[in-house]
Amino acid sequence: SGYSCAYSNAISWQTATTPVPKEVNPRLVFERLFGGSDAADAAQTLAKRKKLRKSILDFVLEDANDLKGTLGARDQRKLEEYLTSVREIERRLEATEQGEIPTDLAGIEPPKKGIPRDRGEHIRLMGDMMILAFQADMTRISTFMFANEGSNRPYREIGVSDGHHNVSHHGLEAAKVKAKKEIDIYHAEQLAYILNRMQSIEEEEGGTLLDNSMVVYGGGISDGNRHNHFDLPILMAGNAGGRLQTGQHMKFARMTPMNNLFLSMLDWVGVDCEQLGDSTGQLRGLF
């Protein structure tokens, strides 16, 4: 469509012309979150742990035990659940790096070092680390791409050997329409995993992590066959702390800017913003 690949490979931007590079390696994300204050510190800590064959939790065990002694029973349980989640992710990373994750995906190209061969495991692993970052209040905002826009990778995990981009230009050919549907379902299943995990985490102020979040899921094209960039099907999950009314399907006027939704979300989290890109005003009826 005349856009550079930067627009199909990034959804987070520092300026109008500068994308924020995404990190696709789970190990590097883990070390950024838990390994140290900067890249050099994280790399040194990782090397030390590997040499001693220790978990990252072994380095904070004494502090964690001291903290546990000051907490009530409920908070002790929450701390234990959090530490268990960190260790479980660490085990999955180690299994990936050692090639121990079982797979029967014959014909799939070898994975890059540290990246799971199974795409679903890759998405779920990254999603679990995003959730841990939310739990620990390391960040309150995350952008998460399941795949690049325009990607032509096949999905042999679910029996689709043709490229995603190819089947999106299906020309109403039944086999390609079916393959496209299966890819969409596969992505939705990964989203469901992340949302269910968020719903399972109770928050101190009440409700669950999902209740107190806003999750926007969708893509940049409504009809891949026609390359339509308007009337996008967007799914919103979470209650935004009680502000967002869920369980409804809403249809807005044709050519309503996507930025109207983002403008509304900024307002819901207390950011005073009158204009965002091509926005024409906030969406009505969502809360």
Image (tube, grey):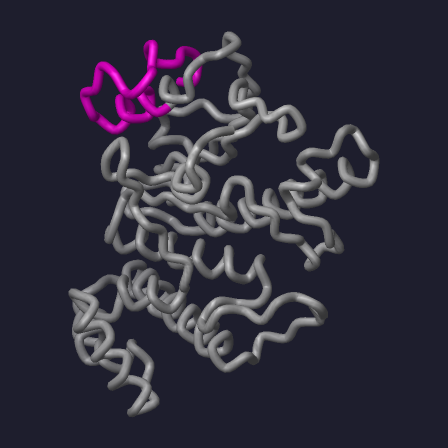
Does the image show residue 32? Answer: yes
Q: Nearer the viewer, residue 127 or 243?
A: 127
**Where, by quadrant of the figure, is residue 210 drawn?**
top left
Q: Nearer the viewer, residue 55 or 5?
A: 5
- Identity of the residue drawn at 72% across and 55% down: 158
Q: Main secondary structure of the magenta part?
A: loop
* Relative height, residue 102 to residue 130 (above, below): below
In the image, farthest residue toward the bottom? 52
Q: Nearer the viewer, residue 87 or 97?
A: 97
**Where, by quadrant of the figure, is residue 99 drawn?**
bottom right
- Identity of the residue drawn at 63% across and 75% down: 102
Does the image show residue 208? Answer: no
Total labels: the figure holds 0
In the image, farthest residue toward the right? 174
- Identity of the residue drawn at 33% across and 40% down: 12
- Identity of the residue drawn at 68% across and 41% down: 166
Give the position of the C terminus as an image quadrant.
top left
> Image check: 102 left or right of 171?
left
* Relative height, residue 186 to residue 176 (above, below): below
**Where, by quadrant of the figure, is residue 55 drawn?**
bottom left
Residue 163, percent from left and from top:
67, 48
> Image check: 18 left or right of 246?
left
Q: Which residues are magenta?
A: 262-287
Residue 244, percent from left and from top:
40, 25
Residue 203, percent from left and from top:
33, 47
* Relative height, residue 151 to residue 89 (above, below): above
Q: Is residue 40 magenta?
A: no
> Image check: 247 left or right of 20?
right
Q: Is residue 263 magenta?
A: yes
Residue 52, percent from left and from top:
29, 91
In the image, farthest residue toward the front? 2
